[in-house]
Image (cartoon, helix red, strand yellow):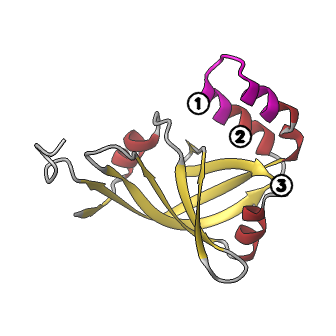
Amino acid sequence: MLQKLEKRNYDQMISDTKIPIRLAYMNNDGIPSVLSLWFVQINEKIYCATQKSAKIIQYLKKNTVCGFEIASDKPPYKGVRGNGSVKIIDDVGKDILQILMKKYLGEKEYELSKFLKKNSHNEVAIEITPQNLFYYDYSARMRGVF
């Protein structure tokens, strides 16, 4: 059962989670696609970062409407689904990437963090303004299954 999500549930649901957002978009051929990205919530908006040359940036500039899901793959299934509008922001990509690396990788220096920092000058931010949010929780339905 989907429930309209109240802001406080949304904040609690996604603020500390280390799972990626699944971002749904339309490619240039009008075919729906999904991409997983690291995300962070700041002031009721969702931010991701990626390279300016990534195809997703072209697609989102052409069609600024997206769908998304933030949910674990492990049962019992629960998460947040929604849709919203997207804006690409060139000048904060590097800053958003720093926030994302701290959230997902912590303070430890990994090869991945070195690689991301080395290429951070080409990062852009994807800003998602959620318009409809729904929360689902199948814990009761799946009780005793797992």
* Residue at x 50% of width, y 67% of height: 83
C-alpha separation, residue under disc 1 versus residue under disc 3: 21 Å
Element marked by disc 2 = helix
Placement of 40 over or under 125, stated as above or below: above
* Sooner in the amino-acid sequence: mark 2 or mark 1: 2
Left or right of 47 on screen, residue 55: right
Residue type at tag 2: Ile
User: Which region shows up in magenta?
Assistant: 100-116
Q: Position of residue 22 (x, y in %)?
A: 53, 56
The quadrant the N terminus occupies is bottom left
- Mark 2–mark 3 Cα distance, whole angstroms, equals 13 Å
Q: Which residue is mark 3?
A: 52
The type of residue carrying mark 1 is Lys
Q: Quadrant of the C terminus?
A: top left
> Measured along the vertical axis of the image, is residue 37 above or below residue 61?
above
Outermost residue on the bottom side: it is 30
Q: Is residue 109 left or right of residue 133?
A: right
In the picture of the structure, the residue carrying the numbered disc 2 is 96
Q: Residue furthest top?
A: 108
